[in-house]
Amino acid sequence: MNSGSGIQELMAAETRASQIVAEARIARGDRMKQAQVDADELIAAYRLEQQDAFDKKANADGGSGGNASAKLQAETNADIQNMQGQFQSNAQKAVDVLLSKCCEVSLEVPTARIRSTQKIYGK
């Protein structure tokens, strides 16, 4: 009966070991979750600090940047006008090129195509 009790002791030890491993996995998962929460808190605090610094600098440099915004808007509008003018001047040229390419289609069938078709249909 000594060997039977030895097997039972081994099985009990294996069960305890698997429980220890499972508890360690759970503890590791809990530590990882806590580390993620801590990291998120640090990131949020850093982001808030950087946003405050940016807002202070933006306000010190002239408020909301209304003058720079107006200048950028004026440049954008000028670029849009320039592009529309280029479109108007080149639209007819583009249409002419497209029409000339459509009209240049060759209606001649290449001899290689004729031969391959004849091979397929046995003529």
Image (cartoon, rainbow, N blue to C red):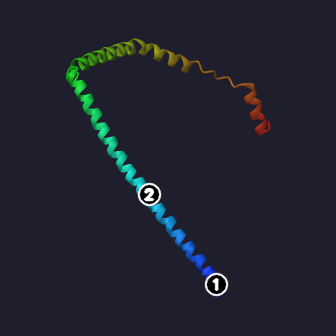
Q: Tell me what residue is drawn at x 44 percent, y 57 percent.
A: 29
Using the numbered discs, state the Cα–Cα distance from disc 2 to disc 1 in whole angstroms.
38 Å
The local secondary structure at tag 1 comes to helix
Q: Tag 1 or tag 2, which sits nearer the N-term?
A: 1
Q: Nearer the viewer, residue 26 or 109?
A: 26
- Residue 92, labelled with which disc? none
Q: Percent from the top left, x then y, of residue 3?
A: 66, 83
Give the amino acid at mark 2: Gly
Question: Residue 64: x and y, percent?
Answer: 21, 24
Front-lying residue, 106 or 91:
91
Q: Quadrant of residue 62?
A: top left
- Residue denoted by label 2: 29
Q: Quadrant of the C terminus?
A: top right
Q: Amino acid at mark 1?
A: Gly
Q: Is residue 95 left or right of residue 84?
A: right
Check if mark 2's residue and mark 1's residue have beta carbons within 8 Å: no
Specify few, some or many for label 2: CA neighbours under 10 Å numbering under 14, 14-19, or 20 or more.
Answer: few
Eyeballing the image, is 92 above or below 53?
Answer: above
The residue sitting at 26% across, 16% down in the picture is: 71
Q: Which residue is mark 1?
A: 4
Secondary element at image label 2: helix
**Nearer-the-camera pick, 80 or 25:** 25
Q: Residue at x 35, y 16 (%)?
A: 84
- Residue at screen point 19% across, 23% down: 63
Callout 1 environment at 10 Å: few (<14), some (14 to 19), or many (20+)?
A: few
In the rendered picture of this protein, how many numbered marks are placed on residues? Answer: 2
